[in-house]
Image (cartoon, grey):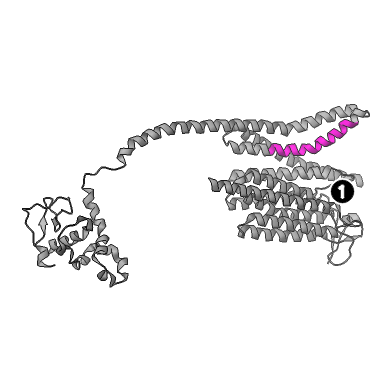
Amino acid sequence: MSENNENKQWKCICGQMNSSPFCINCGKKKEDGQDPVPSVAASTMAAAAAVTMTAEDKIPQPQVQQPYQPVQQQPYQQPYQPMQQQPYQPVQQPVQPQMQQYQPMQQPVQQYQPVQNPYQQYQPQYQQQRAAYSMPLNEKSEEEQSRMKKVSNRLSIISLILHYGGAILITTISAVYSGMSGTELGDAAGSLVSILSSLMGATYIASIVLMIVARIKCKKAIFAKVLMWLYIAEAIICFILLIVVFIAFLELLSTCSA
Amino acid sequence: MTFSFREFELSPYIFFVLSGMIIGLTLSNIIMRKKGVAKLSCFLASFLVAVSIFTFTFTGTFKGIDDLSTIGFDGIYASAGLVLGAFMSSMIFREDKEKIMSSFICTAPLMYSVAKIGCFLVGCCRGFGYDGPFCVSYEALGEVSFFPVQLLDSVSFMLLFLMGLILVIRCKDLMRVTVIIIFAGISLRFISDFLRISHEGCILSRTQIILLFAIIVVIIATGVIFYIGRKDGKEKEHE
């Protein structure tokens, strides 16, 4: 550090040693009466402070910005290790890029400035908007839920009708047909029963599909849930009955053939 | 090497058919869960497929039955029920349509393979008259021996299942895998039908005509799925 530089040091009222006309800690301007403080530590700090200054400050003190060599010995250099992968480049670099490297040091200075949070002015407005929009949204979702529940219940009712309606219809027509056997109307009813019995499988599958759709539309719908378990229980009973009937049928066939 | 079976006191046919279905549905559930499909979706899709298989099988079995002694579950109708059930499930759960469809179609050959073991033991769906190696004879049918077409079906569909499983696990384009498995299954069944006793004296059997019809249906269904997938993709892009 040169003598010239040491003589430019001054102590601010906050206790910070500075070399620039403004304090790097509190931002106060150097007063005319303040004496320079010649010390090695102060000169080092001064160098660091000098580096923090940007070109925008436009201070007419070129001798402060010249000696950058001691600045690199400071601990502030450590975070910039990746930059030293090219060992000779920092030396060759012009003054301007080096100053830009130290720009983050200006942040502490800004912290002490009485600047208000720029978003604070928008907060009341934001809160008003939030209050205006949040309530209708909740109401909307509730409305949507109740609407979906209604749709789900409707689908469940249709499913139930299809599930048992087909079987009841065919049983009724079969009963009527058995009473009409031998007549012309009886033959017509017979063909109708045969068509309906083919459709019975389709209605059965359609009822299951509708139940699943109802169950998905609104997962909280109790009717669809009950219907699902009803169909499952029915399917399990049918499954067991199928095995029993099939085995009994085969046994009967083998007995008859014997 | 020849096979000969005595008449069973209790037919193992129903046991193999139902166990094949249960194993297949369980496995497809496991695959769906591994692929990240929700529990409720897996459960409901399986239920729909099971109901669809049963409904189609019963409709096919009891419609047009002339001889009660030849009654049995028809694999073609069951397959049609499975494909329709899987298609409906994939349409309901659109977010996972490829995963659901591929899981059920992948396990369909396994169900068929296990069910065919039951046929092989009982003697239904047997092959043409044949007395070479691996011929099979049944005590109930006299001293006549047949070509073991059920065993061939069982082995070939088991291999198809393994191939499909590997494809479903490894490939990302599940829809393509599904279509490949369906076409491979239909082709295998179409070819094996030439070796059946029911095919004798006709150019194309009833089953083969149904299979040809199934190919058309599968092509249309695939087109519909691709179209819906594309539409959904465009909607997502807009959002």
**Residue B39 screen position, x and y as percent:** 59, 45
Q: Residue at x 74, y 31 (%)?
A: A165
Residue B204 lies, in percent from the top left, at 86, 55
Q: Amino acid at mark 1?
A: Thr
Q: Please identify the dominant SS of the magenta region.
A: helix
Q: Which residues are magenta?
A: A187-208
Point 23% across, 54% down: residue: A106
> Residue farthest to the right?
A182
Q: Is residue A36 left or right of residue B226?
A: left
Q: Which image quarter: residue B54? A: top right
Q: Looking at the rendering, in which quadrant would you find the N terminus of chain A?
A: bottom left
Residue underneath mark 1: B70
Decide whether residue B151 is among the magenta residues. no
Q: In terms of depth relative to the viewer, which is nearer, B181 or B158?
A: B181
Q: Is residue A192 magenta?
A: yes
The chain that hosts pointer 1 is: B
Residue A226 in the image, given as x and y percentages of width and height:
63, 33
Residue B27 appears in view: no
Going 20% across and 55% down the picture, which residue do you hit? A57
Residue A93 at x, y percent in the picture = 26, 68
